[in-house]
């Protein structure tokens, strides 16, 4: 049997039935569901529209939208017709969107809302190949808006068409599809440089979903809360394809700010996440006791949190059972009380954070991957979870450590190549081995440990190599540090740009009798800067002299995805930030 996602979708539909509810979207405080039968009908009628308008095999269809059921419908309609979807992050600038639409040759662009419509309209004159722009939302109230049709106008159900006719037609289309056929081209946002289009096939995604399911044992009793973008391979494979093909329910978070409110509503068992969100929850829990009224409740909470921070906590001990009953259970209730795993990827997980969640009854499984590997290469095992590692390679994935300690990967998960870019493809894939650009090692149990990013290693002007992530992690535990980026490549010494957590910075100022009229005044206060430098020095005393931060600058503006400082998985974009704060960086070094 051919291993294609369209075949898998049909098999799951026939196995679980038309009434199986899959997707849940919140609108006006109410969740609306879409079942399997409704999904198939919508896919069918979108296919008919695309056929009628002359779209044919290998044509490119762009999607600029937050996660929604329309995204899924468009994705599968493309698959059945052997069209290639081009997902585009909603946070990209008009110039970046123009590059992707032009490079891919997209003939139609589906968009989520008026903001994305304005973005596309501003560049449309430069894209003669872009024939249609179709909003998912109803924008009919906007005059002269510039779209061609609404999604609701092109995806119209005809009750005379039976469910059997639809299934038979989709089966016929699916039988034409081969495992090596392209599903998508995902343009990597990257932390540097021009985006590259990663070509991924049915075989790539199918092998990755199949291997992930064997490790995580997802089934139809599971519920996912989806908040990371489908435009990223991580959420697309694990939070969408994996969940869908295992029969799980998928609830959509309205945005990152509503996650806390929607966790107890959706009651998920699995949350696909990035370390940044876990860090925020962790530090909020660590600090929330300080704001409680003095008394027994505060003492009990602080005791329980301190207990969960320990490394040798026995869940059979009386202490744990008391803490669980009175504190940890209440914390879990805020997540819906059912979370079995946080699956963490897209960046390095702080082991202290992972162990804390484990101790309060929510296991965090860290994994590792790249867009170029569909994306999951390895993930920790629920029954043998080793913090500080990213788990053993998935079934069917071979990992080798090169002489320079670069991680090399081989298997069905490896991309077909970069679109229109033979040079970079040849550099990335050599003799079937994907060169990840990451530095790592395999331990005695075969678990992979990432030690650094090959290209991220910095070399000081004194010839010393330093790991930026190691240095950044050494101070990221400070309550008043929201984000940090170090500088040091070809420099005399290491410096840093620090985004403060202003609430905590104000507390630090208050404790040290530093007066101020506004939080912004604090970022240049000399006394406060000396105090922070002292804290940094204490945390870095075990680092080599050349690895220590000698100077830093506090900056007012937070790092955000929308601002361009962070990738969609919340990694810092070093080149962008370095260019943005060029003057601040230069001011930390002596003029020669």
Image (spheres, grey):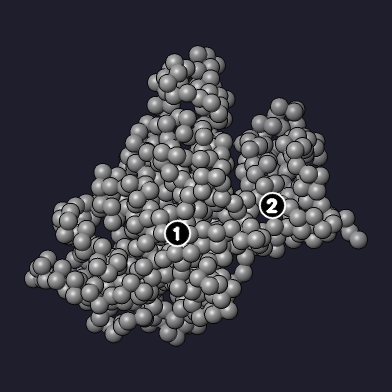
Q: For the residue labelled by badge 1, is the local secondary structure a helix, a strand or a loop?
A: loop
Say which of 437 and 411 sits in front.
Answer: 411
Q: Position of residue 178 (x, y in %)?
A: 31, 75
Q: How far across and down, in percent of the image, does residue 387 sit?
A: 53, 40
Q: Is residue 78 left or right of residue 366?
A: left
Residue depicted at x 24% and y 68%: 1
Local packing at callout 2 (Cα closer than 10 Å; few below 14, some 14-19, many 20+) is many
Distance between mark 2 and mark 1 Cα atoms: 29 Å
Q: Is residue 483 visible?
A: yes
Give the camera-side residue of 571 and 143: 571
Numbered label attached to residue 131? none
* Marker disc for residue 397: 1
Judged left or right of residue 80, residue 589 is: right
As drawn, the residue found furthest toward the top would be: 296
Residue depth check, mark 2 versus mark 1: number of the one nearer the observer: 1
Q: Which residue is mark 2?
A: 468
Mark 1 burial class by Cα count in 10 Å: few <14, some 14-19, many 20+ = many
Which is more N-terminal, label 1 or label 2? 1
């Amino acid at each position: 049997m051919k291993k294609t996602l369209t075949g898998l979708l049909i098999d799951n539909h026939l196995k679980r039935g038309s009434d199986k509810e899959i997707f849940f979207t919140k609108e006006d405080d109410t969740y609306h569901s879409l079942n399997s039968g409704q999904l198939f009908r919508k896919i069918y009628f979108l296919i008919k529209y695309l056929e009628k308008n002359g779209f044919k095999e290998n044509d490119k269809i762009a999607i600029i939208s937050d996660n929604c059921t329309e995204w899924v419908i468009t994705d599968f309609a493309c698959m059945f017709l052997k069209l290639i979807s081009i997902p585009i992050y909603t946070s990209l600038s008009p110039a970046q969107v123009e590059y992707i639409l032009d490079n891919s040759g997209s003939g139609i662009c589906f968009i989520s809302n008026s903001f994305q419509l304005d973005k596309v309209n501003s560049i449309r004159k430069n894209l003669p190949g872009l024939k249609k722009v179709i909003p998912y939302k109803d924008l009919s109230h906007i005059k002269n808006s510039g779209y061609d049709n609404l999604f609701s106008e092109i995806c119209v159900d005809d009750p005379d068409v039976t469910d059997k006719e639809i299934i038979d037609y989709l089966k016929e289309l699916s039988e034409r599809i081969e495992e090596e056929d392209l599903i998508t081209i995902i343009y990597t946002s990257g932390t540097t440089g021009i985006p590259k289009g990663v070509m991924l096939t049915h075989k790539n995604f199918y092998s990755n979903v199949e291997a992930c399911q064997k490790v995580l044992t997802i089934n139809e009793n599971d519920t996912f809360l989806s908040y990371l973008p489908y435009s990223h391979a991580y959420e697309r494979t694990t939070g969408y394809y994996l969940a869908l093909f295992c029969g799980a329910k998928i609830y959509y978070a309205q945005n990152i700010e509503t996650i806390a409110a929607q966790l107890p509503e959706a009651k998920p068992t699995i949350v696909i996440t990035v370390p940044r969100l876990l860090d925020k929850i962790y530090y909020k829990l660590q600090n929330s006791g300080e704001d409680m009224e003095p008394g027994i409740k505060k003492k009990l909470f602080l005791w329980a949190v301190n207990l969960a921070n320990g490394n040798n906590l026995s869940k059979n001990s009386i202490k744990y059972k008391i803490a669980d009953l009175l504190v940890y259970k209440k914390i879990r209730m805020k997540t819906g009380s059912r979370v079995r795993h946080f699956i963490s990827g897209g960046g390095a997980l702080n082991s202290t954070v992972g162990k804390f969640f484990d101790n309060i009854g929510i296991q965090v499984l860290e994994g590792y991957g790249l867009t170029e590997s569909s994306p999951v290469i390895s993930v920790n095992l629920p029954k043998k979870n080793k913090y500080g590692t990213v788990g053993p390679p998935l079934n069917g994935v071979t990992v080798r450590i090169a002489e320079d300690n670069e991680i090399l990967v081989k298997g069905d998960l490896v991309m077909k190549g970069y679109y229109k870019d033979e040079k970079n493809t040849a550099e990335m894939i050599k003799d079937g081995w994907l060169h990840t650009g990451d530095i790592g090692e395999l331990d005695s149990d075969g678990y992979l440990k990432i030690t650094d990013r090959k290209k991220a290693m910095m070399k000081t002007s004194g010839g010393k190599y330093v790991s930026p992530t190691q240095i950044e992690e050494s101070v990221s535990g400070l309550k008043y540090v929201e984000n940090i980026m170090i500088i040091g490549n070809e420099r005399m010494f290491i410096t840093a740009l620090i985004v403060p957590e202003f609430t905590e910075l104000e507390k630090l100022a208050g404790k040290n009798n530093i007066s101020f009229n506004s939080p912004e005044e604090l970022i240049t206060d000399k006394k406060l800067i000396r105090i922070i430098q002292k804290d940094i020095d204490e945390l870095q005393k075990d680092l080599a002299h050349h690895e220590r931060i000698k100077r830093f600058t506090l900056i007012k503006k937070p790092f955000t995805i929308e601002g361009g400082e962070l990738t969609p998985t919340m990694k810092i974009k070093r080149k962008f930030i370095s260019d943005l704060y060029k003057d601040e960086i230069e001011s930390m070094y002596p003029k020669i």
